[in-house]
Image (cartoon, coloured by chain):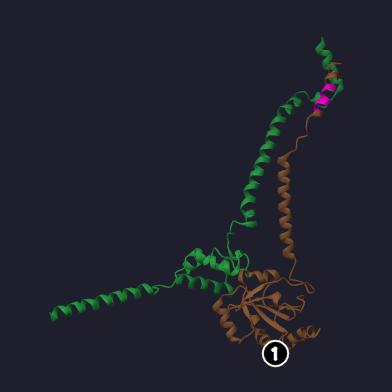
Amino acid sequence: METIEMTESAVPEAESLPARIPWGRVLVWTGLLALLVILALGLLRTELGPVAIGQRVPDFTLTTFAGEQIRLADLRGKVVVLNFWASWCKPCEQEAADLEAAWRYYQPRGDVIFLGVDYVDTEPEALAYLQKFDITYPNGPDLGTRISQAFRIKGVPETYIIDQEQVLRNIQISPFSSLSDIKSRVDPLLNQ
Amino acid sequence: MMKRTFIALLLALLYISLAAGLAQAQGSQPNPPSDDAVNAIAKGLYCPVCENIPLDVCGTQACVQWRELIREKLAQGWGEARIKQYFVNQYGDRVLATPPARGFNWLVYLVPPLAILAGAYILFRAFSIWRAKAPQAAASIERPGLAQGDEYIRRLEEELNKR
């Protein structure tokens, strides 16, 4: 009988105690969750691949070897042919002359601009490359690899053709095969 | 008088030629930087093109050019810190073997020690619980019938105790 009384009196006492929050566990689980989210975001970014056709391209500023600053947003209304290259890249040499010929073909029109982004390169070799292929369109180093990271390139050469509304319309993940190959991708974007 | 002037002129010429020679010796680089000196810096750098291969052992053309750049900078009298900062400015933080402790990079430095501390805490708690349970388990082994809730044995023991 005594036992029953004790039990009955003990229950309300236990219920009246404030519920203790296990802060240690909450902290550990929150930390683990945050770490998993960061890892997942990193993996997602790695798996994203390059900027997709039809997407608005990220804005960037290219500082050319001559010191001129070119901002993509300022080129709205023009077709932009953005070529990633490097002096150590042998396949880049295959398309260098065709890119320069295409630039000279479109330059008088004024509504097409070619930009060369020199990826992970050393300046003396890059300048020698530009001189060797007599490249005259604006070229500059990818400082901090910011532009290549924004476009999530996988290597060089890669070329992105951007329309007048700054939407990506064409990607070439290897050298262009000829001048007509370049023209066949740029011409449909003109006079739209 | 003439003799003194001649000696003074001779001494002045000797001083000027010595000073010029010394300046020239200081200005010229006696030896180009050795491969070891270049590689000592290169081993702390990674080229983004050849991920996971330190610059000092990477054989691609891009890495060869980077090592030559280090050699050039060393020849110009640049120190290791300045050369590494130049590479960071040109190619970003990811060229460094050891990421700088800022932003998300802090995770690299904080997560491993925190994980070890958390693991040690979990082990400590687990051992404490096991130790607390050990005497109870021993008592159960001594009186296995009770531990199993054998009502018959319990009542039998009660009766025996009454006598």
The brown one among the chains is: A
x, y percent for residue B61: 58, 75
Could you tell me which quadrant the N terminus of chain A lies in? top right
Magenta range: A8-14
Pointer 1 residue: A108
Task: Give the colour in which the image draws chain B.
Answer: green
Q: Is residue A30 above or below residue A89?
A: above
Q: Residue furthest top?
A: B163
The front one of A73 and A6 is A73
The residue under the point 70% across, 76% down is: A74
Which SS does the magenta portion mostly show? helix
The front one of B37 and A187 is A187
Q: Is residue B43 above or below residue A155?
A: above
Q: Is residue A13 magenta?
A: yes
Q: Is residue B144 magenta?
A: no
Q: Residue furthest left?
A: B1
Could you tell me which quadrant the C terminus of chain A lies in? bottom right
Q: Is residue B125 above or below residue B148?
A: below
x, y percent for residue A36: 73, 53
The front one of A7 and A142 is A142
* Amino acid at dot 1: Pro
